[in-house]
Amino acid sequence: MVTFLFTLHFLARYLHIVCATALVGGTLFYEMVVPVAIDELRPEQQLIVFARARWVFKWIVWAAAVMIILSGIVYTTEHWKQYASDQYNRPELPPGMTTTMPREIPPGSRPGWWWVAHISTGTIAVLIALSLTTGPVPPARPIRWMRLNLMLLLLVMFLGSTARQARISELQRPPNPQPAPESAPQ
Amino acid sequence: MAWLIILSRWVHVVSACVALGGVFFVRIVLRGGARLLAPDVRDIVQLRIRRTFKMVIHSTILLLLLSGSFNSYIAWNKYQLNPMLMHPLWGTHLLLALIAIAIALYLLAGKTPRPSNRKWLTLNLIVLLAAVAAASTLKWARDTASSNPPGATP
């Protein structure tokens, strides 16, 4: 069971990054590199390149979206205790310490808040990516939408990095010392 | 300092996304996109994409090296918590990344693509995926070691 969970968590972490890579890198190239490369072609040739690339990219976006959501759920489950609490008790105590006082985490350092920001903007970005590649024809002004989505994806990654930093900082913070027991009256 | 660490990690991840996603896009998506074009037009499109790709990849390599050096410097003390596990992982990640950079520089040198461009791109994609796997495992090992420092277990 432990081996299974380890493998699952490891795979989730790896897939989350690789799928984000496919989504962000693909969007950046679709939005920034391809239009520059084909701007001297005739309009019908430009349409052929865009339409074919969109057809291939559609499957990548769908696969990446499904894998990102699934791996995100596994990743969240792994760290749920830290995301769900606004107080933190160190699970394992240094030698000689028997207990710690619960300590309230300041709002800006709460991993849960950054996690909520990460998944809410991430959901919007994935939905935009899916809507841009679904359907027989692209929406009006697809490049602008892609640009907006790229900005959003970069923000999502920033929020993910911050959530992780907040989580690690809380783990590394030294525990509150146990209050000294009051001496018994003589 | 925390913001600098977050910024550096973000730059590293975004640069890796651009590099890996770019190789993936050029190798897989764009081949499908340009397949229906006439061969001469396809060559023109591929040359123009290569030119832009070169600028993107060169900037990405610079950012990856800078942010990677800073991230390693910041995390170096944590690598000492379990050197038997983390140093080989760090070394593997670095080695694979340097191989990928060398392949990218070799592929993008000169004004025309190499004859075996496709094979090299595929190899680079695999090396980059392996580098991400090594980095991901290193991150797991670092997080585990940080949350359970030696002597903390009761």
Image: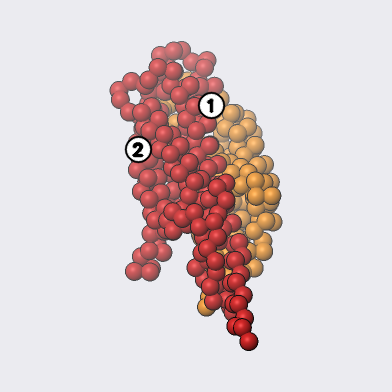
Give A11 or B88, whichever is nearer the viewer: A11
Do marks 1 and 2 share a subunit? Answer: yes
Report x, y in % for residue B111. Answer: 62, 30
Which chain is mark 1 on? A
Q: Position of residue A60 (x, y in %)?
A: 38, 38
Q: Residue furthest bottom?
A: A186
Which residue occupies the foreground of this view, B136 or A70?
A: A70
Chain letter of disc 2 in the image? A
Residue at horizontal 63 percent and vertical 32 percent from the top:
B55
**Residue A87 at x, y percent in the picture:** 50, 57
The residue located at (37%, 20%) in the rendering is A139
Total label count?
2
Residue B36, quarter of the rendered image: top left
The chain coloured orange is B
Dot 1: what SS?
helix
Mark 1 → mark 2, Cα distance in angstroms:
21 Å
* Figure colour of chain A: red
From the viewer's perspective, tell me whether residue A121 is left or right of residue A181: left
Is A71 or B150 nearer to us in this picture? B150
- Residue toward you, A184 or B11: A184
Disc 1: CA contacts within 10 A as few (<14), some (14-19) or many (>=20):
some
Q: Which circle marks residue A32 in the picture?
A: 1
At a point 48% along the width and 21% down the height, the residue shown is A144
Q: Amino acid at mark 2?
A: Trp
* Identity, as a three-letter code, of the amino acid under mark 1: Met
Residue displayed at 33% across by 20% down = A137
Q: Which residue is mark 2?
A: A62
Please state the horizontal and vertical placement of residue B50, each as a whole percent of the image: 56, 30
The reply to whether the C-beta atoms of the residues labelled 1 and 2 are less than 8 Å apart is: no
